[in-house]
């Protein structure tokens, strides 16, 4: 499963500039703990006094709210209706423009923030990530601070640019970064199937879960070993393309070998009139291998390898895409025949509790197959879109986060996976072997 958030193209003029984000006087930086979910950075941000979860996305200009439910209560100011367009195979979508909002990240504050609210309730990325995500924010934060992201410890620091001082570190490398139309771009080299390295100009996209996306042209061709795949979801619909790998990606002096790559279908970019000299994008599966300092004010980026640098790239070997689909009731046997609770029920610690019955009913997230790749091991075994996942290799999935379930389904090539599902109120067990996706070359 892969979910992407991309550059947002607005078909209307920006109505004024928002006041900058600011630290309290005399404060040099603000430290914030974030969640790293499927290579995405999730930050807690207050909007007009309501705490929400935002994904930090360097591919967007202005904050966007897109997952406000009946249970959420938030006031937004100075509202007008607009249309916005984004990546995907659909058209523009209706949204609200709102000015004069207060955004707060601990001690960081902006009292005149412009934001957009997507009012299409079908657009909900939380189901794929497994946690509530209410919106995305990008350029406004990067513009106003030197942003130090430690992917290893999941800590981000926002520094006052006027007081920030670089530390000498032989293991770090500072590279020039281009800021164009509120987006950051980086130069790199890509080696494809043993050919000479091709220089590429890539969008730096913290809102992409993938490694790199490349646009096919006279110099950059799709490797012979590839397969068609669902690449993700944008604001304007689904994105499809070709999944493959390249011999290497070089950023500065750092080289990632046998790196995951994708070539999105050109139809997904119908809303983008001109790519300029851009050749693709670099996303979270590469970025998380570094601790990164984004310095937009000085147009530079500093990289330092972390412990994830040599981690293998993840592929959807099973062909299954998952999402949360509401809640379901499950029954759990929690005591033995004498009414004494079983060991291992961590919720009760070491205390033995007597029950009259042996069963507890619990509401747990329902995990559903939202998509399945044609010709994949799971499809060949007989699994279908809409199947409810109950267990993987004997482990009941309601005990795990959705990213952990995805890892179980795609552990390693050659592994046999057993999946228990519910279909039309019947339980079915399927088994399949995870295959090497690039063993057989496709023309």
Image (cartoon, rainbow, N blue to C red):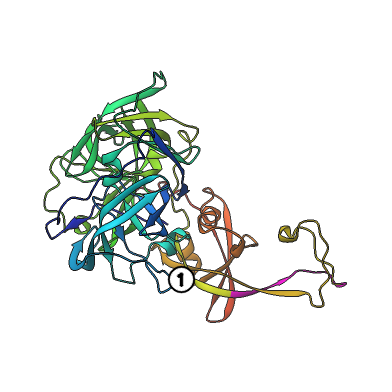
The quadrant of the rendering that contains the N terminus is bottom left
* Outermost right residue: 338
x, y (%) of residue 61?
23, 50
x, y (%) of residue 200?
22, 35
The answer to which quarter of the image holds residue 357 is bottom right
Query: Magenta stretch containing residue 333, yes or no?
Result: yes
* Outermost front residue: 25
The total of numbered circles placed on residues is 1
The residue pinned by badge 1 equals: 384
* Residue closest to the eye, 401 or 163: 163
Left or right: 182, with 126 as reference point: left
Badge 1 element: loop
x, y (%) of residue 224?
30, 45
Q: Is residue 228 visible to us here?
A: no
Query: Magenta stretch containing residue 36, yes or no?
Result: no
Which residue is at a point 12% across and 43% down the rendered structure image?
276
The answer to which quarter of the image holds residue 430 is bottom right
Magenta range is 329-338
* Residue closest to the eye, 34 or 285: 34
Rendered position, 354 above or below 177: below
* Residue closest to the eye, 298 or 370: 298
Left or right: 34, with 252 as reference point: right
Which residue is at a point 44% across and 72% down the rendered structure image?
71
Rendered position, 13 above or below 367: above
Q: Is residue 394 visible to us here?
A: yes
x, y (%) of residue 305?
43, 29
Left or right: 251, with 355 as reference point: left
* Residue closest to the eye, 112 or 423: 112
Disc 1 residue crowd, few under 14, some 14–19, many 20+, Cα 10 Å? some
Which residue is at a point 23% across and 32% down the rendered structure image?
299
């Amino acid at each position: 499963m892969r979910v992407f958030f991309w550059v947002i193209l607005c078909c209307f003029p920006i109505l004024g500039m928002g006041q900058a984000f600011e630290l309290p006087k005399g404060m040099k930086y603000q430290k914030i703990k974030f969640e790293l979910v499927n290579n995405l950075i999730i930050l807690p941000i207050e909007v007009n006094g309501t705490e929400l979860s935002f994904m930090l996305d360097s591919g967007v200009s202005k904050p966007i709210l897109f997952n406000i439910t009946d249970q959420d209560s938030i006031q937004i100011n100075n509202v007008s209706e607009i249309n916005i367009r984004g990546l995907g195979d659909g058209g523009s979508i209706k949204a609200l423009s709102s000015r004069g909002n207060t955004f707060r990240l601990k001690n960081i504050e902006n009292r005149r923030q412009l934001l957009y609210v997507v009012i299409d309730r079908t657009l909900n990325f939380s189901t794929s990530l497994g946690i509530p995500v209410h919106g995305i924010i990008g350029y406004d934060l990067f513009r106003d601070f030197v942003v130090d992201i430690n992917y290893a410890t999941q800590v981000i620091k926002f520094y006052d640019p006027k007081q920030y001082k670089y530390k000498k570190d032989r293991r770090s490398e500072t590279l020039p970064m281009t800021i164009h139309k509120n987006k950051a771009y980086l130069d790199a080299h890509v080696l494809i199937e043993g050919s000479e390295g091709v220089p590429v100009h890539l969008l730096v996209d913290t809102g992409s879960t993938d490694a790199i996306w490349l646009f096919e042209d006279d110099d950059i061709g799709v490797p012979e070993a590839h397969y068609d795949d669902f690449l993700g979801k944008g604001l304007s619909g689904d994105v499809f393309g070709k999944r493959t790998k390249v011999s290497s990606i070089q950023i500065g002096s750092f080289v990632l070998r046998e790196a995951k790559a994708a070539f999105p279908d050109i139809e997904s970019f119908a809303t983008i009139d001109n790519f300029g000299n851009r050749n693709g994008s670099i996303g979270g599966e590469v970025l998380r291998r570094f601790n990164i300092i984004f310095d937009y004010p000085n147009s530079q980026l500093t990289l330092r390898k972390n412990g994830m640098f040599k981690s293998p790239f993840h592929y959807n070997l099973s062909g299954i895409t998952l999402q949360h689909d509401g809640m379901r009731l499950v029954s759990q046997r929690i005591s033995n025949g004498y009414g004494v609770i079983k060991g291992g029920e961590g919720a009760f610690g070491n205390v033995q509790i007597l029950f009259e019955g042996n069963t507890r009913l619990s509401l747990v997230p329902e995990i559903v197959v939202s998509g399945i790749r044609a010709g994949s091991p799971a499809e060949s075994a007989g699994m279908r879109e809409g199947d409810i996942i109950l267990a993987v290799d004997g482990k009941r999935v309601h005990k795990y986060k959705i990213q952990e379930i995805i890892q179980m389904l795609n552990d390693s090539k050659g592994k046999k996976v057993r999946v228990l599902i519910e279909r039309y109120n019947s339980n079915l067990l399927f088994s399949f072997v995870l295959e090497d996706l690039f063993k057989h070359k496709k023309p």
